[in-house]
Image (cartoon, rainbow, N blue to C red):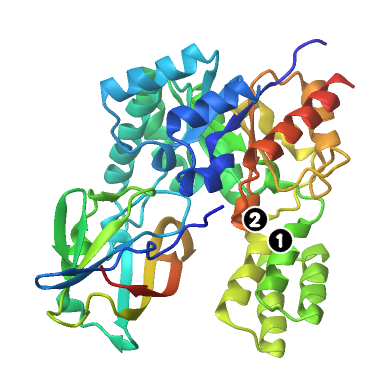
Amino acid sequence: MSAVKIIEDDSLRVTPSGFEIKVRYRWYRTLPLSCMEYLELAVDGEPVDRECIRFAINGKSYELHEMADLVEEYWFILDAATLQVELPGRIRPGQPHRLDLSLGMRAPYIRTGPGRFLTIINRYSTTQVAA
Amino acid sequence: MNAKPILGTTLYSFTNEWLQRLYTLEELVDKVAELDLGPAVEAVGFQSFREYPDVSDEFAYQFRSLLDRNGLIPSCLGGNCDVGRHRDRLMTEDETVDYVQRQLLSAQKMGFPVLRIQTFVGPKVFERLAPLAERARVQVAGELHSPLHAHHPEVLELRECFDRLESEFVGFVPDFSCSISFPPQVYWERLRQLEAPEGLVEEAKQVWLADLPVPDKFAALAEAAARYVVDEAVKAQLNMSLTMFGRMPVEQLAELLPYTKHIHGKFYQVDAAGLEPSLPYPEFMALLRRQGYQGTISAEWEGHAFTEETIGFEQVRAWKAMCRRLLEG
């Protein structure tokens, strides 16, 4: 049995502009990207600036501030999205790095008050060696 | 009276297997047939179908063929009214109607006779959906889930609306979670896993049993949680005891049957003796027999809210054996 991992195993890759990881969320159904309430990533305990992160899904990629408007771009529940991080040299191949991810997804039909909805909280920490 | 409900399952019962990518959609449906868990098959659109909410003709054809070759029949498509999909505002009434209409068309293409939506959209939206549903020949039905019950103001308002419309294309999908005997063992175990103190678990049980209005119960749980100093995860889990497990008397289900298009046979744990101690299944089945209900019921195993174990298939198999036995009596 393999439970759903919010950061997929062995997904850390060094890229020319920095690094990337593959991420999922644990809920029972697909949501549009507009339902992403927050995404916070830290590497070796240091928070990564939001502006350095691009979110790639369905063959397209977005800056995090663009997500709120994407009501018709769906993140299928079985798919991993790729976080492309622009931090050249931050991750070294062959070295272990600790990754902490916190991802909040709004449940857009579960109301908790007037105009407020339940947030599905996904928190995950892992140490991976970059390929 | 020989009329009996038609049993089946929702693919949502296999959420753990699905999320862990152990089966493709085709393999999942094949396995439902192989284990004789049909004939009625339900699915949550946003869980099972990549193209949802707008499935293509080609995919719909493949899906219908998949059910056909397995001797299965589509029962209900789980749709969603995502009124909060925009970050800064609610969907308007027009947008909500359009959003549901897209899902009605997908249901029609895939052969589902019923589209499940949420009741909170209210009578005005149902009134506008009725002619669209009629044209699509797909019934649109609001799910009656805990903490709703037959006499809840939101439900009474809809019953009045359905009476006025006199349309067989609008109605309800009652979920057995409205009438729980006692929240299941797996729920309390999960609370303990989150390190809720035993005293708090006991108090939560007493709150659930208390004869109080639901808002007062939420307040009582918050007060108890504050006394024990617990984290947000425990507080959220405590509130689930009220949102997941309702206390509607089973007899109220009879009042809902004239509007019922499909039923969610919610359950958590069928035990070794073939019983589900947290739900009054003998009473449910006796009532459905007595009332001559001939519609579909899905096994809806929701134990996956508490465990990632891949036991959906064995649980649904045990559920079906239990229901069959009870319906024969």
Q: Chain of mark 2?
A: B
Who comes first in sequence, dot 2 or dot 1?
A: 1
Q: Quadrant of the C terminus of chain A?
A: bottom left
- Nearest the viewer among B97 and B270 is B270
- Count residues near mark 2 (Cα–Cα under 10 Å), then give few for <14, some for 14-19, many for 20+: some
Residue position for label 1: B187
The structure residue drawn at horizontal position 48% and vertical position 49%, both measured from the top left corner, is: B20
Is A42 above or below relative to A67? below
Residue position for label 2: B244
Amino acid at circle 1: Tyr
Q: Is residue B40 left or right of residue A104?
A: right
Tag 2, which secondary structure? helix
Q: Is residue B233 left or right of residue B125?
A: right
Amino acid at circle 2: Met
Mark 2 touching mark 1, by CB under 8 A?
A: yes
- Count residues near mark 1 (Cα–Cα under 10 Å), then give few for <14, some for 14-19, many for 20+: some
The reply to whether residue B86 is in sight is no
Q: Is residue B300 left or right of residue B167?
A: right
The structure residue drawn at horizontal position 32% and vertical position 55%, both measured from the top left corner, is: A80
**Name of the residue lying farthest toward the front:** A94
- Nearest the viewer among B321 and B134 is B321
